[in-house]
Image (tube, rainbow, N blue to C red):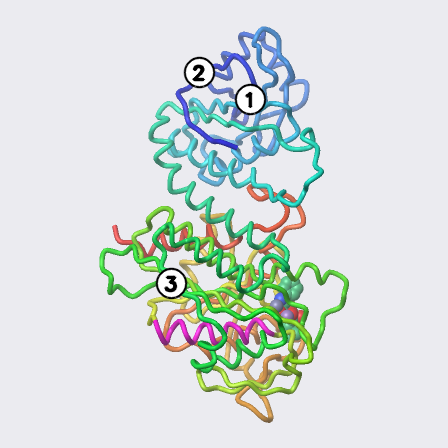
Amino acid sequence: MKISFAKPGLPGSGAVVVPVLEGRTLSALGAELDERTGGALGRAMAASRFEGKKDQSLTILAPANLGLSRVLLLGLGKAAEIDEARAQAFGAAAVANLASATDEEAAILSDVIDGNGLGSATFAAHAAFGARLRGYRFDKYRTKEKPEDKPALKKLVIQAEDHKEAKALFAPLNAVAEGVELTRNVVSEPANVIHPESFADEARKLADLGVDVEVLNEKQMKKLGMGALLGVGQGSERESQLVIMRWMGADKDNEAPVAFVGKGVTFDTGGISIKPAAGMEDMKFDMAGAGCVLGLMKALAGRKARVNAVGIMGLVENMPSGNAQRPGDVVTSMSGQTIEVINTDAEGRLVLADALWYCQDRFKPKVMIDLATLTGAIIISLGSEHAGLFCNDDDLAAKLMEAGQKSGETVWRMPMGDSYDKQIRSDIADMKNTGGREAGSITAAQFLKRFVKDVPWAHIDIAGTAWTKKDLTVTPKGATGFGVRLLDRLVADHYEDR
Ligand code: BES
Ligand code: MN
Ligand code: ZN
């Protein structure tokens, strides 16, 4: 779907989308449409109890005298409550509602939307952002889908008085959308396609945008002493990889970077502590943390963010085999700390232990944030409404919670504390990799904390938010791309040169 911006005006064909404020207030062009149809819009709204409340929609097919195939009325709610999120939801609703229509072209008549001081250009840009995010489809493996079952919409024109400004405002949002789409793509790919080496190849493609990409193989990681990460990948035919991406966009090259570290288990069978068969296919998404880091780097580079950012992905496949790590094995991490592997299915923390250590050791970041589909327990705690936030720094936690509110990718802070450490005490090594059923997400975070030095650090458990089984406002069901918008927002608000 191609998105463009244009001056307001009534088109003579195709579909049009009309925003309606609560109380059935039509925009100027909406009112003109109503007049030209002899009041059909007003009558249709009254007859169907359409008030213009947010999320309400009403389609009027082939209205007389217009040449249009349909008029889609979308409720925006109260003018004073219109913000970026509402604009995004509006654009998304337009695409979702037109998905089953036959129109290849649609125009959004957002001519006088200027709610809450947002400005019509900003409204249009965010509507475009929402439309693009909601219009995503991962359909490359559907070879037999009939054309009539696919969305027909090819061209979406968003009208705004200052359409040039809208276009300019959309450019960085479009870069973020491209990052989100990359994340969704790699997370959607099955594990026979995305494995550590092919995932690293995806990262190498970011070189086109000016991202510096390095890939460490098993031999190099062994030399660095990454026994924790390597132990997880040891049962797999695929070679583990550590990918290091750097985007140096700050004014000063020697400015300490912000660092992002992602769990990239391209498939998690559980290893010798094998998972039950039912639902195991979902574990292709166990690399969503790394997927987010990849998409985020693409977003930052794509919009030329004025920040130095490092993205690290620990890529492994967790398989059972004659060569796999066993429960009871003791591994030595790069930090020198030893770990008793009680359960080979608690593998994400082992991967992150070495990736986090390497990150700090080499880059001395000013802040470090990891993302991981780390625990089933976080789904029990928070469902899919919030990701779990674990943080050693109140200021960073506050920034992340605010970025979550603004971006719509919300996080909820969970407690940490030394009192949980007794759950991961080992009789034979410095720690064990599981802490029992109680507070499973917290003991996992306490485990990670042992690999964090004196740096503001946040761990975001995205096990409940990286995938959705139902359509969400700006996210069709499937891989969500969670974290890209959140962290892009964090960087934009707090870590960029101005
Ligand atoms: N990748 C899983 C966590 C997960 C489970 C994500 C379900 C999404 C949905 C992780 O590697 C894992 O297996 N964790 C175990 C830890 C346990 C063995 C301590 C879990 O959550 O059960
Ligand atoms: Mn696991
Ligand atoms: Zn896992």
Q: Secondary structure at mark 2?
A: loop
Question: Crowding at label 3, few (<14), some or many (≥20) Cα neighbours within 10 Å?
Answer: many
Q: Secondary structure at mark 1?
A: loop
Tag 2: amino acid: Gly
The image shows residue 87, relative to residue 230, as above or below, that is: above
Label 1 and label 3: CA atoms lie apart by 49 Å
Nearer-the-camera pick, 200 or 437: 200
Kind of element beneath mark 3: strand
Return the mark for residue 310.
3
- Residue shown at 61%/55% (left/top)? 384
Q: Magenta part of the protein: which range?
A: 347-362
In the rendered image, which residue does mark 2 sit on? 9
Q: Could you tell me which residue is drawn at 39 percent across and 64 percent down?
A: 259
Q: Earlier in the sequence, mark 2 or mark 1?
A: 2
Q: Position of residue 17 (x, y in %)?
A: 54, 23
Determine the image quadrant of residue 134: top right
Q: Quadrant of ligand 2?
A: bottom right
Q: CA distance from mark 2 to mark 1?
A: 21 Å
Mark 1 lies on residue: 24
Task: Characterize the magenta stretch by its predominant secondary structure.
Answer: helix
Q: How far from the left and from the top, in percent, is residue 251?
A: 23, 55
Mark in the foreground, 2 or 3: 3
